């Protein structure tokens, strides 16, 4: 990945490329941006620019080949990992490198859920632990293989647990010579302030509408389809590519939403519908915590768009619900000024408890009942 090949972020790329050429690179960088904004691609481009800096001819070609295959000896990776049948609680990222290289080659805009699914462990919740922090110390205290920069790229640094983050503070503040940390994060609120303060911050926005359209067309997507996907994805390239492949988690999420909505309406007149709501909560609770969180965030967007449509702002709505027999327009009148705030609050609280390893069945069952009650709240006359 080269800066010239990035989708969007040309201004930020030009600034960092100039700093590299002039030898003015900070030793630690934090790239912040929303999901699908290309954080990983940008981080890889930075790493590749650094290790290939100053090389020409055959040496430059060899360096670029190594970068393309993600096996340059002076670029090291850390990323969230999960324990499974083939790994132990002492596993480190090097144990997952073949899968990681496949993932970033095939899904450079992929999110955590995609990564866990790639590992076949989508029902787990990963992190970057203290054993990985020890590995980072070990790797960065070795000499650079090619005598130039050593890079430590930490994808989703917001998943560093507290013990690991604390162990890296000293290394981030005083790294070995010609060592550069590149951290990426979508949720800086989960990071230690002392960690963030040691990094130079670069904020990336979502991919621009026209840039996304141009990229999709370059991949062979018809113009009309590219325009529709860019509109629906709102700067999230991962979402656009998921929709294109018809492999979007949103398809499952929309089915779950409609299943809940139908049971919630039945609950007003049929007591048996409460059992359906309990079965619904059990079904959603079967998936991993990351998927549960993603679904709850989808639900917030779903209700928000219903609210916007209720007040005549349908042009701001981008969700596409393709469940047979469900008409979003008929649902819209039930979301209004008297229930949107408590609905959003209930969903935010559910996300909070899921993140803290609460019992998924209990959280979702309580949520299903709360939202059912709130759905029947009447709008102001």
Image (cartoon, grey):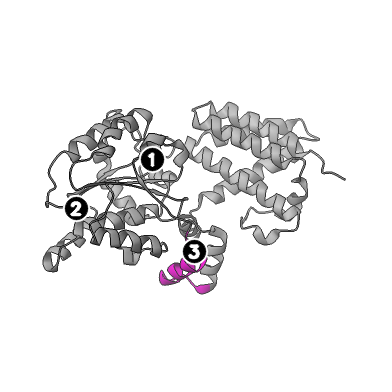
Taking the magenta stretch, the answer to whether it contains residue 211 is yes
Rounded to the nearest whole Å, what is the CA distance between mark 1 and mark 3?
27 Å
Badge 1 marks a residue whose secondary structure is helix
Taking the magenta stretch, the answer to whether it contains residue 52 is no
Rounded to the nearest whole Å, what is the CA distance between mark 1 and mark 2?
27 Å
- Callout in the foreground (1, 3): 1
Q: Name the residue under label 1.
A: 196
Q: Earlier in the sequence, mark 3 or mark 2?
A: 2
Q: Residue 288, percent across and down?
A: 47, 36
The mark found on residue 1 in the picture is: none
- Callout in the foreground (1, 2): 1
Q: Residue 339, percent across and down?
A: 74, 40
| Total marks in image | 3
Near-viewer residue (101 or 234): 234
Q: Name the residue under label 3.
A: 208
Q: Look at the image and tell me whether residue 240 can be seen.
A: yes
Near-viewer residue (281 or 4): 4
Q: Magenta stretch: dominant SS? A: helix
Q: Earlier in the sequence, mark 1 or mark 3?
A: 1
Rounded to the nearest whole Å, what is the CA distance between mark 3 and mark 2?
31 Å
Magenta range: 207-223
The mark found on residue 72 in the picture is: 2
- Callout in the foreground (3, 2): 3
203 sits to left or right of 250? left
Residue beneath the point at 37% across and 55% down: 108
Residue 292, placed above or below residue 308: above
Q: Residue 189, percent across and down?
A: 47, 38
Which quadrant: the C terminus? top right
Q: Residue 256, percent across and down?
A: 61, 43
Q: Which of marks 1 and 2 is nearer the N terminus?
A: 2
């Amino acid at each position: 990945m080269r800066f010239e090949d990035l989708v969007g972020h040309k201004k930020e790329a030009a600034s960092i490329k100039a700093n590299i050429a002039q030898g003015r690179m900070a030793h630690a960088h934090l790239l912040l941006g929303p999901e699908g904004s290309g954080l990983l691609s940008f981080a890889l481009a930075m790493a590749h620019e650094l290790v290939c800096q100053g090389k020409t001819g055959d040496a430059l070609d060899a360096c670029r080949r190594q970068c393309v295959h993600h096996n340059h000896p002076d670029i090291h990776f850390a990323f969230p990992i999960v324990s499974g049948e083939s790994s132990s609680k002492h596993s480190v990222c090097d144990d997952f490198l073949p899968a990681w290289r496949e993932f970033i080659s095939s899904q450079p805009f992929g999110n955590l859920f995609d990564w866990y699914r790639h590992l076949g462990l989508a029902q787990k919740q990963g992190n970057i632990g203290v054993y990985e922090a020890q590995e980072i110390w070990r790797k960065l205290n070795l000499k650079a293989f090619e005598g130039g920069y050593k890079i430590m790229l930490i994808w989703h640094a917001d998943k560093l647990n507290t013990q690991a983050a604390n162990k890296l503070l000293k290394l981030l503040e005083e790294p070995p010579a010609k060592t550069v940390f590149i951290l990426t994060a979508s949720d800086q609120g989960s990071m230690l302030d002392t960690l963030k303060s040691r990094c130079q911050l670069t904020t990336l926005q979502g991919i621009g509408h026209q840039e996304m359209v141009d990229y999709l067309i370059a991949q062979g997507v018809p113009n009309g389809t590219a325009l529709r996907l860019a509109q629906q994805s709102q700067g999230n390239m991962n979402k656009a590519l998921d929709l294109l492949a018809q492999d979007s988690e949103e398809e499952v999420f929309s089915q779950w939403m409609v299943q809940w909505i139908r049971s919630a309406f039945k609950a007003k007149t049929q007591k048996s519908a409460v059992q359906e709501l309990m079965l619904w909560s059990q079904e959603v609770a079967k998936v991993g915590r990351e998927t549960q969180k993603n679904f709850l965030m989808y639900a917030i967007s779903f209700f928000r768009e219903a609210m916007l449509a209720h007040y005549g702002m349908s042009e701001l709505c981008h969700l596409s619900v393709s469940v047979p027999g469900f008409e979003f327009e008929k649902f819209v009148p039930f979301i209004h000024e008297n229930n949107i705030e408590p609905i959003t609050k209930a969903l935010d609280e559910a996300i909070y408890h899921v993140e803290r390893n609460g019992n998924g069945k209990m959280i979702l069952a309580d949520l299903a009942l709360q939202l059912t009650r709130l759905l029947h709240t009447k709008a102001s006359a």
